Image (spheres, grey):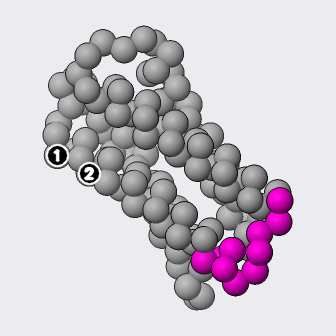
Amino acid sequence: MSTYQIRIVGTGLLFLFTFVSGFWLSRSGKPFNVIVLTIHKLISLAAAVLLGITIYQINQVAALSTIELTAGVVTGLFFLDAIVSGGLLSIGKPMPAAISTMHRVTPFLTVVSTAVTLYLLV
């Protein structure tokens, strides 16, 4: 396996662990278990960083096309939205239902967008 393939598989595994820990958090109810919440946040951050590094390094080897760059930016925005909405939900204050809905939908959009971005890059 090449380095990029290993990173793609690693990103996929990090997404899987993010979803598993997220479901675990949602099923455990509030207040959230601090250890599980921290693991969930760190895993999702690691997935975002690994994807960002991979895209950056691919761009260094060969310039990204407009569609590849756009897909990367959209994926980054979905990641940012998922992280911000998750952070708002974890502070312990009541949040509007839209924030909760956003955090339930955005991770799936992030996965789809990441898959499309990685497909375009490979």
Q: Secondary structure at mark 1?
A: helix
For the point 36% across and 40% down, the residue is: 22
* Residue at far bottom of view: 1
- In this rendering, the answer to whether 3 lies above or below 115 is below
Whether residue 52 is visible to the viewer of this picture, yes or no, is: yes
Towards the viewer: 60 or 79: 60
Asked if residue 110 lies in the magenta stretch, the reply is: no
Whether residue 111 is visible to the viewer of this picture, yes or no, is: no
Asked if residue 65 lies in the magenta stretch, the reply is: yes
Q: Quadrant of the N terminus?
A: bottom right
For the point 39% across and 33% down, the residue is: 86
The type of residue carrying mark 2 is Ile
The type of residue carrying mark 1 is Ile
As measured in the structure, the alpha-carbon distance from the residue carrying label 2 to the one carrying label 1 is 6 Å
Residue bounds of the magenta highlight? 57-66
Q: Residue 67: image x %, image y %?
A: 82, 57
For the point 52% across and 45% down, the residue is: 79
Q: Is residue 115 left or right of residue 87?
A: right
- In this rendering, the answer to whether 8 lies above or below 69 is below
Towards the viewer: 119 or 86: 86
Q: Residue 81: image x %, image y %?
A: 52, 36
Towards the viewer: 29 or 58: 58
Q: Quadrant of the C terminus?
A: bottom right
Total label count?
Answer: 2
- Please give the residue where the numbered disc 2 appears in the rendered image: 39
For the point 68% across and 64% down, the residue is: 118
Q: Quadrant of residue 55?
A: bottom right
Indicate which disc residue 50 carries. none
Indicate which disc residue 35 carries. 1
Q: Are marks 2 and 1 in contact (CB under 8 Å)?
A: yes
Q: Residue 101: image x %, image y %?
A: 50, 21
